[in-house]
Image (cartoon, rainbow, N blue to C red):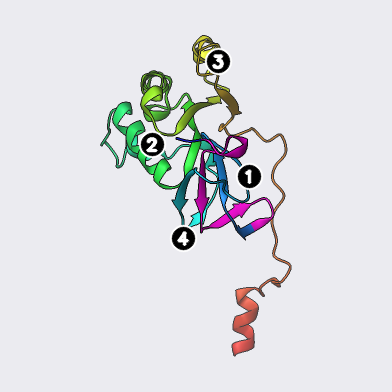
Amino acid sequence: MRDGSDGITAAIEGGRVVSPEGIVEGTVLLSGERITGIGEAPAGVERIDAAGRLVAPGIVDIHGDAFERQLMPRPRTTFSPEIALTETDRQMRANGITTAFHGVSVSWEPGIRGPESAREIIEALTRLQPHLSVDTRLHIRWETFALDAVDTVIGWMDGPSAPIIAFNDHTTPERSTPRPRRTNARCTPRAPVSRWRSTRR
């Protein structure tokens, strides 16, 4: 691929471009895999016709757990993490997502959000990462009462995937005081049934 001036290697032309200023008409200039700006394409570079299309930067999904639908599309029906993650990769790419953080739960719950399932998902993701088209990363959703998983989570944090982490607490807190009784200001108290009957006679 021939380089144009300023290292421009390709230009996306004819589309409506999503820019910081809004949607504009223009030519998107690329240098390798990076967007360098909107402007005139130099001679000799690859030209990509985007007429009638919307040209946008890749979407960064900082938290997603849609892959769970591929793991368990219906109750008691499960697929391997490799199949689920590969299918999720195809779906994300088709929807313009180029970077994604998969929210993997480490919980005291059984099933696909338990520690053993999390380990299988993370190991599969580590093996698949070089072959996925989307830059797929890890977001650990750690239930704070999953105390048995402390050492395991620390090991993942020190691993090569460099995940981000969120602390979750889905337990129900105890209340020291009773809840106030809710009233509807628009309603008036009903008269006793005996009074209603007396007015009917």
Measured in 3D between alpha carbons, the distance from the residue under mark 1 to the one under mark 3, in whole angstroms, is 36 Å
| Residue 89, label in figure | 2
Based on the picture, tell me whether residue 21 belongs to the magenta stretch. yes
**x%, y% of residue 184?**
69, 65
| Residue at image point 51% right, 58% down | 15
Return the residue at label 3: 157
| Residue at image point 55% right, 15% down | 157
Side of 2 where 42 appears, left or right: right
| Residue 178, label in figure | none
Which stretch appears magenta?
3-22
| Residue 37, label in figure | 1
Q: Nearer the viewer, mark 1 or mark 2?
A: 1
Q: Earlier in the sequence, mark 1 or mark 3?
A: 1
Measured in 3D between alpha carbons, the distance from the residue under mark 2 to the one under mark 4, in whole angstroms, is 27 Å
Please identify the residue farthest to the bottom as the structure is shown. 201
State the residue in front, 127 or 72: 127
Callout 3: 10 Å neighbours few (<14), some, many (20+)? some
